[in-house]
Image: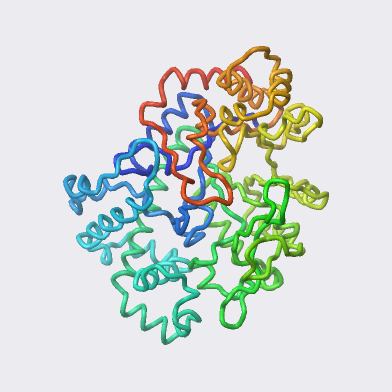
Amino acid sequence: MKRRAGVLLAISSIPSKYGIGGFTKEAYDFVDFLESAEQSLWQILPLGPTGYGDSPYQSFSTFAGNPYYIDLKEFIDKGWLTAAECAKYKVSHPEYVDYEAIYNSRFALLRKAYNKSGIANDKDFKVFVKDNAYWLDGYALYMAIKDSKKGISWLEWEDDIKLRRPSAVKKYKDKLNDDYIFYQFQQYFFFKQWYALKSYANEKGIEIIGDIPIYVALDSADTWCNPELFKLDKDCNPTHVAGCPPDVFTADGQLWGNPLYKWDYHKKTGYKWWIDRLAACYNLYDIVRIDHFRGFDEYYSIEYGRKNAIIGEWLPGPGYELFDVLKKKLGNKQVIAEDLGFMTDSVRRLVKKTKYPNMKIIMFAFDPEGDSEHMPHNYEHNCVVYTGTHDNDTLVHWYQTLKRKEKRFVKEYLGLSRASSTIICEAIIRAAYASVADTAVIPMQDILALGGEARMNVPSTLGTNWKWRLKKDALTPELAEKMALWTRTYRR
């Protein structure tokens, strides 16, 4: 592997006129910035449609794309919307995403465009619908029904449609046909525009790192359409769900609530659903980061209905067999194994056997009393080093909140004496670049040396996450030159 460097920035964080990032001119401008900064990677967060809590890791579909990212300018150019209509729904807070306001405005605009489009007779649209029918049919119907029932979870639907009885599926599809096609319309333009942006990035020598959660959401088309894949009872209610046990950070553990896989069933099918899922990912991305890689070795099972994750049990996952099948079916694709948290020897053996690069987080390195695997002097070539992830504080705020002894050790390690938090921030980025890790990816917030207000997510909390936005004038030529200097200096 060649030495390379990149930036972590969610699509939602890109500046735009309408309150959330998307596949607009500003996204292309960001690609141009990466090129001028001599970066070769752009890592994003999951692209799926978000639900309760606005988390891209709890999506209504593992295959579908977020309609918020569609560039409305294409509809204006086609005459399906006017600039004045779009301006009425303008949501332009410069520093955070107001998801409620966007939810209440964006679908109205998309519907107007759809109503004028005549898309059902479009040849390219028909090809897209046919090629993606294996997931799109279920997703479009699921969303149409969900809208008709004011957004409630499919677990609360009447039994006939909850259990997908053929007569009920046909009844709802006939009744909601226009809404059904509307959701297909959204996905057509999402993928059309994303592929154009990705092609533009690839032409500039920039590869896209995508991110997929190991689990799907309970309230999702994936679970509703494929109940046989998950630990559900005969009435399609979950029996056990995912999470993590208590640790030094969370006394009650983390109760994620995702349905758990019936791995024995997946094995019987030759892991077909996983092959389809990863194949779809490699249409979207060049490299895939798989979140919570530990779950393939063993996973934490919590009885459904419990209020926390204190009581649960570890059960064996599919292990290397799954990745052996994936390699045989899809080829030797690029994967990043997210192996953070408490790692066992068996997880380490699994990661090593797959030969996938794992992750190092410099923010975790500075224990004055220990010798963490996250300290740069302990790295091997086959890893990806980050200053932090979407779940971590920004470097600046992290350093500001350290105890005096820890701050002293950070400065000793970096060879600094008296230094501000912003100087420390750049020194840590340089340490990542200088390390032997083949790949270094830095969150945009750390490159800009931003404080805690720019944090993307605080795990196990609701209400303030996934909102940070990049200011439109933040990406200057001077910043690009500084980043290019890092890249050249450390031969990335």
- 115 lies left or right of 441: left
In this rendering, is residue 63 above or below 97? below
Q: Quadrant of the N terminus?
A: top right
Q: How many marks?
A: 0
Nearer to the camera, 59 or 242:
242
What colour scheme has been applied to the protein in the rendered image? rainbow
Q: Quadrant of the C terminus?
A: top right
Q: Quadrant of residue 228?
A: bottom right
Give the residue at the far bottom of this rendering. 167
In this rendering, is residue 310 above or below 430? below
Q: Residue at x 47, y 55 (%)?
A: 53
| Residue 460 in the image, given as x and y percentages of width and height | 58, 51
Q: Residue at x 65, y 59 (%)?
A: 243
Give the residue at the far right of this rendering. 345
| Residue 299 in the image, given as x and y percentages of width and height | 72, 60
Give the residue at the far top of this rendering. 417
Q: Quadrant of residue 407?
A: top right
In this rendering, is residue 340 above or below 330? above
- 113 lies left or right of 231: left
| Residue 453 in the image, given as x and y percentages of width and height | 48, 35
- Is residue 17 visible in the rendered image? The answer is yes
- Is residue 1 visible in the rendered image? The answer is no
- 286 lies left or right of 374: left
| Residue 164 in the image, given as x and y percentages of width and height | 48, 81
Q: Residue at x 50, y 67 (%)?
A: 219
